[in-house]
Amino acid sequence: MNQNTLSEQVHPDLNTKRAFLTGGATGIGNAIARGLAAQGVTVAIADLDEEAAKAAAAALGGGHVGIGVDVRDPDSVTRAFAEAVEILGGVEICIANAGVSSMRPAVDLTVEDWDFNMNVNARGVFLTNQAAARHFQKTGTGVIVNTASLAAKVGAPFLGHYSASKFAVVGWTQALARELAPLGIRVNAVCPGFVKTGMQDREVEWEGTLRGISGPEVVQDYIDQTPLGRLETPEDVANVAIFLCSEAARFMTGQAINVTGGVYMT
């Protein structure tokens, strides 16, 4: 199978389900949106770039919707989730995927660097999950999947603030999973490794400058760290996220699944 192709595995239980997905206009989020749509899920793609969200939804075909959201703002998240519920007629799946990164040596980090990463990556997941959990508590059904990171398992140089935000996602995922388990609501996370996205392109440039090496050398270092011997694709992550949404993962909750090509194995 082509590395950029989504798995052909079919999860019939997902057909006719409805999903709210943040950060779905590009990258990993867009791959998840395409994968869910292929399973018969109607997707509300919520993104800070509303026009990009609408374009991504239109590319999926009829029935899907694009919504503007700022995951840092509780009012914006509440409104966006409610809009998705109203338009789709309900929501059974929540994917909190919106995320950002920046790079700087730990001693040079500014409060603005810290807050930017924490507010989008940790606060954004918290607010998105909270909106979903409140809805699922009323409906009695639902599943949540959060996007964490390899950096949520191993602190990454120049990404201390990013690592802290993603470690927070894993801790929150575990705590929320324990609270919602008695209701049958599952909460899990995926932890991608070195994924070939626009975000990675920026990081390669930043890291090359910080380490005094070229961009291609940074990329080769990523590959050398990966036992499976290539960069990860958004589809690699999407396949696992979709599995976690399905009944095939019905006895999994509170997990932070490594999707790293073997970079991290614990």
Image: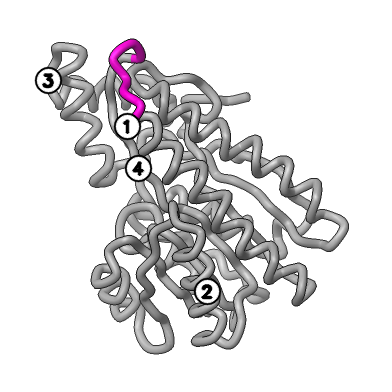
Q: CA distance from mark 4 to mark 3?
A: 23 Å
Vertical placement of residue 5 versus 55, above or below: above
Residue at position x 49%, y 34% in the image: 165
Which quadrant holds residue 117? Answer: top left
Q: Earlier in the sequence, mark 1 or mark 4?
A: 4
User: What span is in magenta?
Assistant: 106-112
Return the residue at label 2: 39
Q: Which mark is residue 112?
A: 1
Amino acid tagged 2: Gln
Residue at label 4? 100
Decide which of 263, 20 is in the foreground and name it: 20
**Reading the chain from its start, which is encountered first: label 1 or label 3?**
1
Is the residue under label 3 in contact with that under label 1 (CB below 8 Å)?
no
* Magenta run includes residue 256: no
The Cα atoms of the two marked residues, 2 and 3, are separated by 41 Å
Relative to 178, 92 lies left or right: left
Task: Kindly report the secondary structure that dominates the magenta region of the rendered protein.
Answer: helix
Q: Residues within 10 Å of mark 2 (few under 14, many from 20)?
A: many
Say which amino acid is labelled 3. Ser
Q: Which residue is mark 3?
A: 214
Q: Quadrant of the N terminus?
A: bottom left
Q: Is residue 226 above or below residue 248?
A: above
Q: Position of residue 185 (x, y in %)?
A: 76, 61
